[in-house]
Amino acid sequence: MPTVPVAAVVSFRLGGTDGVSIEAAKWCDALAALGYELVTVAGEGPVDHLVDGLGIGAATGPDRPAIERALEGADLVVVENLCSLPLNPAAAELVAELCRGRPAVLHHHDLSWQRPNLGQAPPPDDPDWRHVTINQLSRDQLRAQGIEAVTIYNRFDTTASAGDRASTRSALGISPRDRLFLQPTRALPRKNVGAALALSEALGATFWLLGPAEDGYGPELEDLLARCSCPVVLGRAPADTADAYAASDLVVLPSVWEGFGNPTVESAVHRRPLVVGPYPVAGELAAFGFRWFSVDDREALARWLDRPDPTLLEDNWEVADTHFSLRDLPALIAAVLETLPVQF
């Protein structure tokens, strides 16, 4: 009877609502569809192996024996962003050491030079590894550092449920006549929450920020909220994200940096108009044919909200289904794995 290959997925944290955790979960499902048994390893989250010192900014060094035990027997290691950003250099160095000479895929969601004050060091490399980026920009930047990579864009279930608009709005205290603008992100400096608040004020909407403040952004967020004049809903994320999109009249992503920016495609999947900020990868994604509103073009947005054009929403869904469907992910990952020096 053939042995089932084992894939260990390693990151700072898994199973959360951050973009890396969400995409890592999709990769786990795709690897399972390819016949792998999955083992998850992280410093935070509901994982098979919770390892001290593996999380972002951990107070102690990584537990080497625990990581060795977690990776023991793994035929493939998938490293989700842990070796991409220097958020825990000791953990990244140890994981890279333990992966040398064995088949591994380094899945890069961000790179150190793409974040402020994180330095310019490229990720580690090894002949037995393959690198995967979530955008072409990162792939090109890695190539300039002498590291070849393949781009696999984040993928989405384009058949997701429509969500419950009426019940979600009722639970938030939003009347059917009120405008509700949704920013389905955490609150961080690069998410540019202030621009979303200003847009909500200008167009007479309630602003809904789905995620919490992180990385010390709490005081700045409190200051922004104290000065804004529009109604605000913080958190209160429904169990099904589809309900949040269904409840909204507009999705707002005014970020100045995103490695991908999942709301760009999620808004299309849930047939909601999107306002997008000037982050570099947004232009790369827009080139597939999406039609979005600029965060600076309030007049065009106001006209659309007054007289919505469903054609724009249907066209955006078609782009998402054609180029970013989750159904394609197993085949895309399989194509990368076929280039590894050891096959299973």
Image (spheres, rainbow, N blue to C red):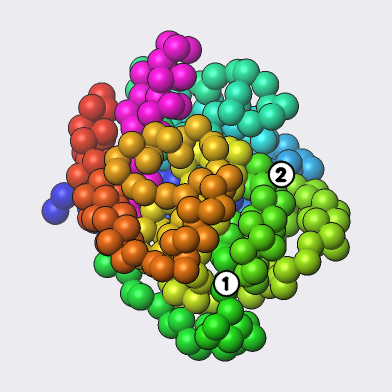
Question: Which of the image's four quarters has the C terminus?
Answer: top left
Q: Is residue 268 above or below residue 286?
A: below
Q: Nearer the viewer, mark 1 or mark 2?
A: 1
Q: Which residue is mark 2?
A: 189
Residue 281 position, x and y percent, is: 46, 35
Q: Which residue is mark 1?
A: 180
Name the N-terminal-most of marks 1 and 2: 1
Which residue is at a point 46% across and 19% down the rendered structure image?
Answer: 141
Which residue is at a point 72% across and 73% down the rendered structure image?
Answer: 231
The disc label shown at residue 241, or none: none
Secondary element at image label 2: helix
| Residue density around tag 1, few if under 14, some if 14–19, many if 20 or more, within 10 Å | many
Amino acid type at image mark 1: Leu
Q: Nearer the viewer, residue 137 or 66?
A: 137
Asked whether residue 41 appears in the rendered view, the answer is no
Q: Is residue 75 above or below residue 115?
A: below
Asked whether residue 138 appears in the rendered view, the answer is yes
Question: What are the residue bounds of the magenta stretch?
Answer: 135-157
